[in-house]
């Protein structure tokens, strides 16, 4: 079950080749504070025999020093490395760990459970294929469970394993597990998560983590590790069309002009007809190159350089697509879900920087369509966006950008919003759709009305503190209802 193999001793080259050909699963652990996320990762590393003796000795010393658990060793200290984390026994920043088994390689992100660090959790989840959502068996589904599940759904993670942890503290009661499963499924009906699995575990004791538990004979399903090894991720990419956001134009001499980038979706071969967007100019692929030489075909995730048969103008931030494929949107206006990451609230109309599919362009948020209450999933009207809040917003750019809906392609449908004064990330976004001319006009009318409503409310609060805006409108219109 662990990464160790007899091939290491007998044929190291064969082992390395086998290891290189394993697929990679990126996953995140999330949930409420003290649900056992860091302990679970520590247990996975410990039982997979991926901890060196000196690391184990250091963790044993720190376990006694910080006294964060009554056990001899606190496995959470393997990932909670910050001084503040160890003193408080909580996770503050995202910590990444790597491990592998005979079947698959893993990169796991341990994310904080506190509401204050929701933005850290969203950052950690943005590149993952799977989420492990931990629930304390004593407490059941909590507010942060719902919050993190909604963000997981919003970020397009299709596989979720709900690990009901600390079963040892409820005597491995099957009824407790079933009740939590039913509560979570009732909430998840409103989320866009295709694959939800459940497993009762004790991260501290190791029950059903890597080895089956002897204390929960009523559970006949696979262990957590068995599920991680078997979950299918090869068909998670929705978009099969070719997308190459241009990150760099390589011009070492007069005889070579190559366009460099990482393929966001699809594949490409020499000889295929392509378009450069937003210009719309067409040509054919002359060569597909990597450091080692020329490729016959390149796939999503590969960093490549392509040369074209014709000299056409392509710059950093443009996108190369296959002419026969469905084209991405080219627009100045779009709607996107934003996760606000700044202490200062979002200011409508203020100019921000946007990075979208490799392109940097300035623009502004012209309207907040609605804010999402992540506890109830209700859509609420709002005038500002505060730290860690999520809302559907209209974005107007100062130049055309090329993008796809995030649900179809993460690489060309995700964006970050940058405060131009501090150069700090203000928000992370997921594109919903481009706006047509008619939709832009309708949204403009709604935005103008909303701005008038906000201004009127402010005046009413100032001069008529006991009235509502609708009362003022009724009196001005001479109506009573």
Image (cartoon, helix red, strand yellow):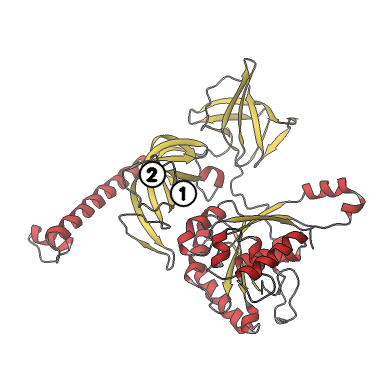
Q: Is residue 241 above or below residue 450?
A: above
The residue closer to the viewer here, 437 or 136, is: 136
Q: Is residue 40 visible?
A: no
Q: Which residue is mark 2?
A: 395
Classify residue 405 as left or right of residue 257: left
The residue positioned 24% from the left and 50% from the top of the image is 451
The image quadrant where one finds the C terminus is: bottom left
User: Residue 389, percent across and down?
Assistant: 41, 58
Q: Residues within 10 Å of mark 1 (few under 14, many from 20)?
A: many
Q: Quadrant of residue 195?
A: bottom right
User: Residue 297, percent across and down?
Assistant: 71, 35
Helix, strand or loop at label 1? It is strand
The image quadrant where one finds the N terminus is: bottom right
Q: Which residue is mark 1?
A: 429
Mark 1 to mark 2: distance in Å?
Answer: 10 Å
Q: Is residue 273 above or below residue 345?
A: above
Helix, strand or loop at label 2? It is strand
Mark 1–mark 2 contact, CB under 8 Å?
yes
User: Residue 88, percent across and down?
Assistant: 54, 67
The residue positioned 75% from the left and 31% from the top of the image is 292
């Amino acid at each position: 079950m662990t990464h160790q193999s007899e091939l290491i001793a007998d044929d190291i080259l064969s082992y390395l080749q086998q290891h290189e050909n394993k697929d990679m699963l990126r996953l995140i652990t999330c949930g409420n504070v003290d649900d056992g996320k860091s302990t679970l990762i520590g247990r996975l590393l410990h039982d997979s025999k991926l901890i060196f003796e000196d690391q184990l000795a250091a963790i044993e010393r720190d376990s006694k020093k910080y006294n964060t658990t009554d056990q001899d060793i606190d496995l959470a200290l393997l990932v909670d490395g910050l001084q503040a984390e160890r003193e408080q026994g909580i996770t503050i920043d995202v910590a990444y760990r790597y491990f592998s088994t005979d079947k698959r390689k893993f990169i796991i992100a341990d994310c904080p459970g506190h509401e204050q660090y929701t933005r850290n959790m969203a950052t950690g989840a943005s590149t993952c294929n799977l989420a492990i959502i931990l629930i304390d068996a004593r407490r059941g589904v909590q507010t942060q469970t719902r919050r993190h599940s909604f963000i997981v759904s919003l970020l397009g993670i299709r596989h979720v394993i709900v690990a009901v942890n600390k079963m040892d503290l409820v005597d491995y009661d099957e009824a407790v597990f079933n009740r939590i499963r039913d509560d979570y499924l009732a909430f998840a009906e409103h989320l866009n998560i295709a694959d939800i699995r459940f497993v009762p575990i004790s991260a501290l004791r190791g029950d059903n983590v890597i080895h089956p538990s002897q204390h929960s004979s009523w559970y006949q399903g696979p262990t957590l590790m068995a599920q991680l090894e078997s979950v299918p991720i090869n068909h998670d990419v929705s978009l099969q069309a070719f997308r190459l956001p241009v990150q760099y134009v390589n011009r070492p001499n007069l005889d070579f002009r190559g366009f460099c980038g990482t393929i966001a979706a699809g594949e490409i071969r020499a000889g295929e007809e392509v378009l450069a967007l937003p210009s719309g100019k067409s040509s054919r692929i002359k060569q597909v190159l990597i450091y080692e030489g020329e490729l016959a075909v390149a796939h999503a995730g590969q960093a490549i350089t392509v040369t074209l048969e014709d000299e056409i103008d392509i710059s950093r931030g443009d996108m190369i697509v296959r002419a026969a494929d469905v084209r991405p949107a080219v627009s100045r206006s779009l709607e996107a879900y934003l996760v606000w990451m700044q202490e200062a609230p979002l200011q409508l109309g203020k100019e921000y920087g946007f990075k979208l599919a490799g392109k940097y362009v300035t623009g502004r948020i012209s309207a907040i369509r609605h804010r999402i209450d992540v506890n109830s999933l209700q859509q609420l009207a709002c005038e500002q966006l505060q730290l860690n809040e999520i809302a559907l917003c209209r974005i107007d750019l100062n130049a055309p950008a090329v993008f796809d809906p995030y649900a179809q392609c993460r690489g060309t449908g995700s964006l970050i919003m940058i405060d131009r004064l501090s150069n700090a990330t203000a928000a992370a976004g997921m594109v919903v759709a481009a706006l047509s001319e008619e939709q832009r006009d309708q949204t403009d009318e709604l935005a103008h009305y909303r701005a008038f409503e906000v201004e009127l409310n402010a005046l009413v609060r100032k001069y008529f503190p006991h009235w509502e805006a609708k009362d003022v409108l009724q009196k001005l219109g001479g109506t009573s209802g």
